[in-house]
Image: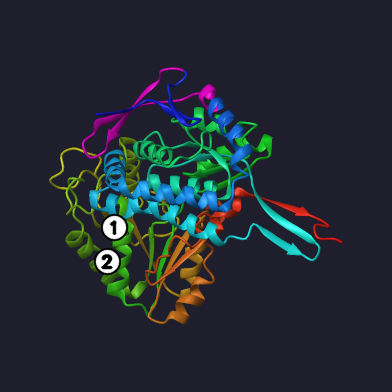
Amino acid sequence: MREYKQFYINGAWVEPTTANDFEVFDPATEEVCATISLGNETDVDKAVAAAKAAFETFSQTSIDERVALLERIVEIYKRRLGDVAEAIRLEMGAPIKLASTAQAFAGLGHIVEAAKVLKTYAFTEDLGEHRVVKEPIGVCGLITPWNWPLNQVSCKVAPAIAVGCTMVLKPSEIAPLSAYIYAEILHEAGVPAGVFNLVNGDGPTVGTALSVHPDVDMMSFTGSTRAGSLVAQNAAPTVKRVTQELGGKSPNIILEDADLEAAVTRGVLHMYNNTGQSCNAPSRMLVPRAKLAEAEAIAARVTETMVTIGDTADEATTMGPVVSKIQWDKIQGLINKGIEEGAKLVCGGPGLPEGIARGYYVRPTVFSEVNNDMAVAREEIFGPVLTMLPYDSEEEAIRIANDTPYGLAGYVQSEDIEHARRVAARIRAGNIHLNGASGGMDVPFGGFKQSGNGREWGAHGFTDYLEIKAIEGYSAA
C-alpha cells in the first residue's frame, strides 16, 4: 500500500501541519490502496506564501527558459508514463489500457502543446505608438477532479508555467496518487521552488481556503456545477478571476441522413468510454422516431458484444468500475428512477454486472423512449448510462438538444457534412463534434451556460492565466 502523506511546498516535501490521514480506495477491489493526508488552512497559507514569493522572479523569466523547463518536464514524464498509468488505474479504476493510452498520455500531451504554443506566442501587440502587453496573472489556485486526473492537472499546470504564473494545486482527494507523481516529475525537472505547490485536502477545507485567500489571484476549477458555484461565491469578495469547467448533459443528434449503424455504434462506445465518467459524454442520443427501434437493437448489440467488464489490470478490459461507493449508489438511484419514470430499459439495469462480485461496477445501461423531462435526461449521471430520445422533426431535435442548463459538448451525425454543420451552428455548447471527430490538444475546451466559463487547452488555454496591460505612448518620439 502506498503512503503519500507529505505535501509539496516551496520545492520540498513537507509534513502536514496536523496529522489527518485519509484512505484512498481502489474501486475495482473496494480495498484501501493508499493513505494520504488532508491539509488545512495553515498548509494552504504556507503554499500560497511560497507561490507569492516565487512569482516575483518566475514571472520575469524568459520564454526560452520556460520552454526549456517544459521540455525537461516532458522528458521525465515520458520516462514515468508507466507509473502514472498504474496510479490512475488504482485511484479511479481506469482499465490499464485506457489509463496507459488515454489518461496518462493526455497529461503528457498538454505539456507538449504548452511548450509548442509558448515558442511563438505573442505576449505583446503594438497599436500605433501604444503597446499592449500580456502578463502572468499571479498566484493561481488549481482544483482538479478525479475522473481524468492528470488530464485536468496538466491542462492547468502547463499553461500556468508557460506564461510565468505560480500555483497551488489541490487534486481530488478521491484520486490523488497520479498528482503526487506529477509533483515528483516537476521536482526532478527543476521547477523553481515555490512555482508549483501541492496540498491534498477536501473541498470544504482546502478548496475553500484557496478560493477565499487574498493572495490567490485566480482560481481554475474543474468539477461539478454545484461545487464550481461555491468556488465562485467564495472567490467573489476578493474579486479574483474564476474559470470553471463543469458538468454536462451532451446531446448526440443522429440526423435522418446519418449512417444509423455507424452513428449509434460510435455514440454508444463513446458513452461507455471511461465508464461514462466524462463531463462531455454524449449521454442523450436523439434519434428519428421512425428509426428508434432499429437504433435500440444496435445499442443493445454493441453493449452486449463490444464491452468487456473486468479486472482493471487486464489489457482486454474496456470498462472498469465507477470511482466510489458514493458514485455507485447515485448511479443506481438514477437507473431505478428511470425505470420508475417509465423509460424503456433496452439493456443493463440496476445491480452489479453478471459475474462481478466486488468492486463498484455498473451494468452498462441503455434507456429508450425517454422524454427530456425525465431525471435520466436532465441530470448528469456520470456513469455508463445512455438515454435515447425520439424526435419527429429536426427543429424538435435542436430544441431538445438545447433544453438543458448545460452546454459543454454536442454531437451531430450526418452523411452530409454541410447538413451537420448547419445543425452544429444551432447547438448551444462549447465543443461540437461532427461524425465522431475529436479535437486535438490545440482545440479550446470549455462550455456555455452552467457548464462553465473560460477555455482550456492549447493557445486558448493561456488566456485565463494572463492579465492585459496597455502601455500608452510606448513608442512616442
Residue at 46% over, 25% down: 39
Q: In this view, does 428 lie above or below 144?
A: below
**The disc label shown at residue 431, or none:** none
- In the rendered image, residue 177 lying in the magenta stretch gets the answer no
Residue 265 image-quadrant placement: bottom left
The foreground one among 338 and 46 is 46
Asked if disc 2 and disc 1 are in contact, CB closer than 8 Å, the reply is: yes
Magenta residue span: 18-44
Query: Going by the picture, which residue comes out furthest to the top?
Result: 18
Location of residue 366 in the rendering, given as x and y in whole percent from the top left corner: 29, 57
Q: What residue type is labelled 1?
A: Val
The residue lying toward the viewer, choosing from 337 and 414, is: 414
Q: Residues within 10 Å of mark 1 (few under 14, many from 20)?
A: many
Residue 251 visible in image: yes
Whether residue 29 is in magenta: the answer is: yes
Q: What element carries label 1?
A: strand
Picture residue at 41% right of the left edge, 53% below the top = 374
Q: Name the residue under label 1.
A: 366
Q: Residue at x 40, y 33 (%)?
A: 173
Q: Pinpoint residue 333: horizontal percent, then vertical percent.
A: 33, 42
Residue 296: image tag: 2
Q: Residue furthest right?
A: 477
Q: Distance between the residues labelled 2 and 1?
A: 8 Å
Name the side, left or right, on which 421 lies relative to 182: right
Question: Which image quarter holds the C terminus?
Answer: bottom right
For the residue labelled by badge 2, is the local secondary structure a helix, a strand or a loop? helix
